[in-house]
Amino acid sequence: MPGPISNRIVLPHIFLVSYPAQGHVNPLLRIGKILASKGLLVTLSAPNTIGDKIRKSNKSISEEPTPYGDGMIRFEFFDDESQHITVPDEHAAHLEKIGKQKLPIMLQKNAEQGRPVCCLIYSCFIPWVAEVGESLRIPSAPLWVQSAACFSAYYHYYHKLVQFPTESQPELDVQLPCMPLLKYDEIPSFLHPWTQYPSITDSILGMFKHLDKNCCVLMESFQELENEEINYMSKLCPIKPIGPLFRYPTEKSAGSAKVDQPILWPAVSSIEVPTIQRGN
């Protein structure tokens, strides 16, 4: 049995909060495994809607810290009460409301159990995590799971630094710094006036609203791939390229748990991003 908290080594605790979609859970789990392998305690948290699927895909999932590399990894899911949502476009606002209530409780419980959280890393679709971190004085950082070029598009759109397609000019081309001219259907679809998911657009742009609440932006890219874009955007906000995240730690201690990448079926995300067809 573990000894009293005072007799145990307290590992730095990184708390990951994921949007309930496989495209967000997987990159967060990858960075979590890398951090755990370096000697940190990592918790991956997400709504039960995806937590139940993760448990079914891997029986090793547990709320108890499990050895991984030189550190530990654990999982803690919460009920986002999504069964009450009947309109898909209301899901983001509902998750924010419930998440702001339950995340502080989870963080406080971890502190009381002897594993205080020293940093929050979260999906870019749930920017309200930065508000929770700021209120509890816990540093936070979003994980941007797309390219630096895509990040630049959202940044310039949010700050109105360049022109983007509008309802009155839907076929307007876009010129971003350090990039070739983009046709109107080559920009991120969530930034187009035709997008079918404006609530997702609002969620992503919320991250840029809260950039000053974060210590940095962790980006799934690397310098050699997008050198000009990363150098340019780093002058506007603190970017830390940490990709490619498909690589896993190659050395594990003998006691490491088998925490594989969860294969979730059916697909967790019910949102399909439409392809905008270029006009004739």
Image (spheres, helix red, strand yellow):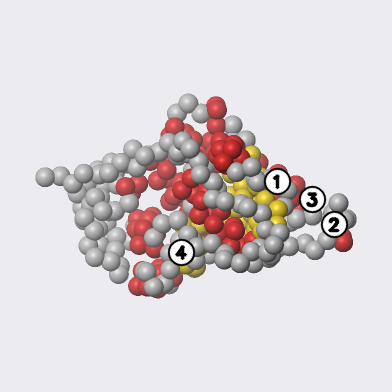
Image coords of residue 28 (percent x, y): 54, 54
Residue marked by disc 2: 5
Q: Type of residue at label 4?
A: Pro
Residue sitting at x 48%, y 45%: 22
Q: From mark 2 to mark 1, how far is it between C-alphas?
A: 17 Å
Secondary structure of residue under mark 2: helix
Q: Type of residue at label 2?
A: Ile
Residue marked by disc 3: 113
Residue marked by disc 1: 63
Q: From mark 4 to mark 1, how far is it between C-alphas?
A: 28 Å
Tags 3 and 1 in contact by the CB under 8 Å rule?
A: no
Position of 220 compared to 180: left or right?
right
Q: Is residue 139 positioned above or below 201 on the image?
A: below
Q: Earlier in the sequence, mark 3 or mark 4?
A: 3
Secondary structure of residue under mark 3: loop
Residue sitting at x 50%, y 54%: 27
Image coords of residue 101 (percent x, y): 64, 40
Residue marked by disc 4: 244
Query: Pointer 3: residues within 10 angstroms few (<14), some, or many (20+)?
Result: few
Position of 141 compared to 167: left or right?
right
Q: Quadrant of the C terminus?
A: top left
